[in-house]
Image (cartoon, grey):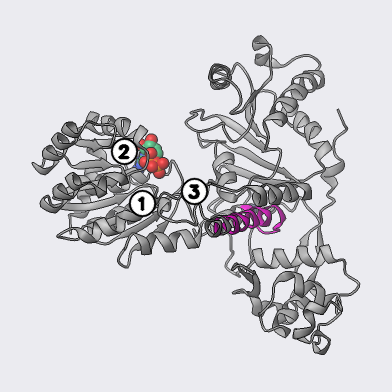
Amino acid sequence: MTDPTAALDALKRYFGYESFRPGQTAVVNALLGGRDVLAVMPTGAGKSVCYQIPAVLLPGVTVVISPLISLMQDQVDALNDIGLPAAFVNGTQAPDEQSMVLAQAAAGRVKLLYVAPERLETQRFRNFASSTPISLVAVDEAHCVSQWGQDFRSSYLSIGEFIASLPRRPIVGAFTATATEKVRYDVVNLLGLRSPQVTVTGFDRPNLYFDVIMMEGKRKAAWIADYIAAHAQESGIVYCSTRKETEALADTLNRAVPAKLGGATGGVASAGRLAVAYHGGMSADVRAAAQRDFVTDRVQVVVATNAFGMGIDKSNVRYVIHHNMPESIEAYYQEAGRAGRDGEPSRCTLLWNESDIVTRRRLLDNDNENERMTPEEQEIARRNRRRLLDGMIGYCRTTECLHRYMTRYFGQEDGPVAGANDGVSASGKPVKCGACANCERTFTTIDVSAVARAISQCVHDVDQRVGSGKIVRILRGSQAQDLAWLNPQSMPTFGMLKDVPEARIRDVLSQMATDGFLYIDAGRLPIVKFGRRAAETVAPGFRYEIKRVDRKTDRSSDGI
Ligand code: ADP
Ligand code: ZN
């Protein structure tokens, strides 16, 4: 065990930072104490420092496994600049050059050695690794090892075996921004982590105000124009789901917003445009110009597809508006998170409606992923993406604090830090976070306690053996033949909700899954089971509400 102040000293000396961020300390201490770590932190939270500081203090070499060959040169240059001896080996180098780097590392002249996973399988690297003391293996983007994630790389599967082949087992740290439970499980098992300390941190962004507004498609443009007109001096990003939409909406905004402002667009007028479109179908020049104009405040708004954002450094984005529902919470978090990098209050608004769900589901079912995958692998990937989408739909529908929903989704159990509370008062009742529309109750609700109770009883009646479609049909008193084996007529809940529309029952059921009353066991045929909060539904005084969908805000704007 290293002297506890040594890590902080190294942080100050090499990086010039005064203190570790929350979460970094735990990871650094665990690694220095010889314990494996799984660290889940969003991009930008400071994962690199978590293995770079131990690398300085541990006696041997630290091998950093990273899939991003294109970034290695920059990462290594940056480390050498601050006096940390680092180098990389990857397939872009000639064999001689690789051998030279490895010889340097073997001679103790390199503390951090960056490698792509493909290198681990080469004889040259194996020889090096079996004769040089390796203290730590840091696996960056560790989710790439899992087929449940979106960036599976088969080369990552060799990492576990590589670690096991070393003469002396190093400490292993796995780092990722991907949160889902299946991915974490794979990371731990496929990399062979030994009772790792799991640290999840940095997902809450207290300066962001989250809002979700259900709105008819044809009202969205007017709403966005109003918003921009009311925030005429601020920079913002509007995300759309298609290239065509970005261009159409940028045109609309360029006509509508100046009209609302009586022709005056403040400092933006000089550039001649208020908004620019940005998507992957535009030429690199046009895209670079759009990006430059936005970063230098010559245009106020970028209307973009998800192609916009990677590597864009603009800290004073005051709002991010989503014109449609993204495919997952991960995607939403990443895009919305581009607001307020400077820590100032900023707003993230998601506009959505039921047709987004239909569109997303269709895209997902038609997308055949990657030709190299077997049909079975494609089915697994599809099922996984369906689950990610369910998380997103849950965010749109939930009545709980949106910060809390997000941090819980990412597994950061301590909840939101927005405001001065932890989301729960001493009495156990949720308290307002002060930074989301749900806590301010900008929506109206429908009391669905009776429907929720009936669903829960029905899950009990069928012994947690069937999917949501059958549950809905039993509750509606369906005579369908495919239910006969369950003998539904004998069940107390048969026909109990015959007067409730099917769509309502489905909405309540999916919301109950989101809120932890039910649990959808996502096999080939998803089965509805009881969730950790199931018992609450039979407690006296159980009350359950869902958001009313035809919100007042639907009618708040005139058409353009
Ligand atoms: P990640 O790998 O999680 O995306 P990085 O390691 O690149 O994040 O860190 C993101 C930024 O935060 C970098 O500019 C980094 O220098 C900075 N940073 C990391 N740790 C600290 C700290 N303890 N104090 C201040 N800045 C930090
Ligand atoms: Zn809240």
**Quadrant position of the N terminus in the picture:** bottom left
Decide: marks 2, 3 in contact (CB < 8 A)? no
- Please tell me whether residue 383 belongs to the stretch shown in magenta: yes
Question: Circle 3 is placed at which residue position?
Answer: 372
Q: Write the start and end of the magenta stretch as one range.
A: 380-402
- Please tell me whether residue 233 belongs to the stretch shown in magenta: no
Q: Give me the C-alpha separation between circle 3 and circle 1.
A: 17 Å
The answer to whether mark 3 is within 8 Å of ligand 1 is no
The answer to whether mark 2 is within 8 Å of ligand 1 is yes
Q: Residue 260's image quarter?
A: top right
Question: In percent of the image, x 51 and y 49: which residue is there?
Answer: 150
Question: Which sits earlier in the primary sequence, circle 2 or circle 1?
Answer: 2
Query: Type of residue at label 2?
Result: Tyr
Question: Circle 2 is placed at which residue position?
Answer: 17
Of residues 15 and 171, which is closer to you in this image?
171
- Please determine whether, in this image, residue 534 is positioned above or below residue 329: below
- Please determine whether, in this image, residue 82 is positioned above or below residue 445: above
Q: Position of residue 170 (x, y in %)?
A: 21, 57
Q: Residues within 10 Å of mark 1 (few under 14, many from 20)?
A: many
- Please determine whether, in this image, residue 322 is positioned above or below residue 269: below
Q: Position of residue 113 (x, y in %)?
A: 22, 41
**In terms of secondary structure, what is the magenta stretch mainly?**
helix
